[in-house]
Image (tube, rainbow, N blue to C red):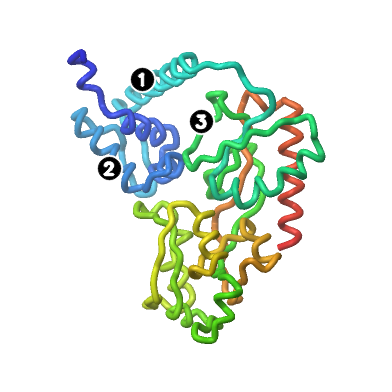
């Protein structure tokens, strides 16, 4: 390797710096890259230390690029754009017919895919490819046509269509609730049960944290009978349906599970997330009839979901 290349910063550091410089917010940049705010801040600090110069001026509740940071950000943005284009060209393959939608694994498996048959009835000639991935895909690169993302309202870009928000509540299998040895009529009764957790060591999903729900419902020191952790939310819900423990349910993602009785919500207590599900259309696809039809269908399905809640 050429000695000049050995001196280059990590690509992850450059991507984090580009996002922070574009949004002028470590918090929004971290959300975009699925990092914690502290992790992104450490990346930028490490980059500044490696360069020997500050890239940002950090003020109370605000962030600004220094002159050196402004110049470096323009260069890094241009290089990353060229790198993305070169990657597209190197991996170019004929485009498949139909449209591609990217979204999280949990949204795809619990809400979108069970409803796709309705879209095929409405638009039988439109093929849909669902790319389920918890990483954020750059819509400007042309690999996908639209995305459904779970965002804070302030992070939703202009033109994004909001489908619905989300409410959290404990849910469990009715078989679990039928056992008289493990009552579940009030939050304190969770001490008799195994709690099912998302494995979130980086703290990226605080709204899915049992500790937050317990504290909000008067049981901050509760010790459950046991815990089980899962990497993906749909796996956690499968475990809840199988009677393996109590899950922190997300409405409307699990609305069908509650409606058909696979899961039961034993408490009235629930809280609303500050986030919601938004549809974002890629720049190259905004005028395509098949994409427009799919967005209209998503909006109709979301309206039916809201009305049934």
The answer for how far apart the CA atoms under marks 2 and 1 are is 21 Å
Q: Nearer the viewer, residue 289 or 91?
A: 91
Between discs 2 and 3, the one toward the N terminus: 2
Return the x and y of residue 40 as percentages of the image width and height. Answer: 33, 42
Q: CA distance from mark 2 to mark 3?
A: 23 Å
Seen at 23% across and 17% down, the residue is: 5
Question: Where does the image place residue 70, in percent across and percent down from the top left?
Answer: 35, 26
**Residue 42: assigned label:** 2
Counting the numbered discs, the total is 3
Is residue 213 shown left or right of residue 295?
Answer: left
Dot 2 or dot 1: first in sequence order is 2
Nearest to the observer: residue 284 or residue 192: 192
Q: What residue is disc 3 on?
A: 138
Q: Quadrant of the C terminus?
A: bottom right
Horizontal and vertical percent position of residue 98 = 69, 27
Q: Are marks 1 and 3 in contact (CB under 8 Å)?
A: no
Assign the N terminus to one quadrant of the image.
Answer: top left
Taking the spot 37% from the left edge, 40% from the top edge, the residue there is 63
- Between disc 2 and disc 1, the foreground one is 2
- Judge left or right: residue 112 versus residue 18: right
Tag 2 near tag 1, CB within 8 Å: no
What residue sits 50% from the left and 86% below the top? 181
Q: In the image, which disc is placed on residue 75? A: 1
Residue 299 falls in image quadrant = top right
Point out the tag, 1 or 3, that comes first from the N-terminus.
1
Q: Nearer the viewer, residue 259 or 56?
A: 259
């Amino acid at each position: 390797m050429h000695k000049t290349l050995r001196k280059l910063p990590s690509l992850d550091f450059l991507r984090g710096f580009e996002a922070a410089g574009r949004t002028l917010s470590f918090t929004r940049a971290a959300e975009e890259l699925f990092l914690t705010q502290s992790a992104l801040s450490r990346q930028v600090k490490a980059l500044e230390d490696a360069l020997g110069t500050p890239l940002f001026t950090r003020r109370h509740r605000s962030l600004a690029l220094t002159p050196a940071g402004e110049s470096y950000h323009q260069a890094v943005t241009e290089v990353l754009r060229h790198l993305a284009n070169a990657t597209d060209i190197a991996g170019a393959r004929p485009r498949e017919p139909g449209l591609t939608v990217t979204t999280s694994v949990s949204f795809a498996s619990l809400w979108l895919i069970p409803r796709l048959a309705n879209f095929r009835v409405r638009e039988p000639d439109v093929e849909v490819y669902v790319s389920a991935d918890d990483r954020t895909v750059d819509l400007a690169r042309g690999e996908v046509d639209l995305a459904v993302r779970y965002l804070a309202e302030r992070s939703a870009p202009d033109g994004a269509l909001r489908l619905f928000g989300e409410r959290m509540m404990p849910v469990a299998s009715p078989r679990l609730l039928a056992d008289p040895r493990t009552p579940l009529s009030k939050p304190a009764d969770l001490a008799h049960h195994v709690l099912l957790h998302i494995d979130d060591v980086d703290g990226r999903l605080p709204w899915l944290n049992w500790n937050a729900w317990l504290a909000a419902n008067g049981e901050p020191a509760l010790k459950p009978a046991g815990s089980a952790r899962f990497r993906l939310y749909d796996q956690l819900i499968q475990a809840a349906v199988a009677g393996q423990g109590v899950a922190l349910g997300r409405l409307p993602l699990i609305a069908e599970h509650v409606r058909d009785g696979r899961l039961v919500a034993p408490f009235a207590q629930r809280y609303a997330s500050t986030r919601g599900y938004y549809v974002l259309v890629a720049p190259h696809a905004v005028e395509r009839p098949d994409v427009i039809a799919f967005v209209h269908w998503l909006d109709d399905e979301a309206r039916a979901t809201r009305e049934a809640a």
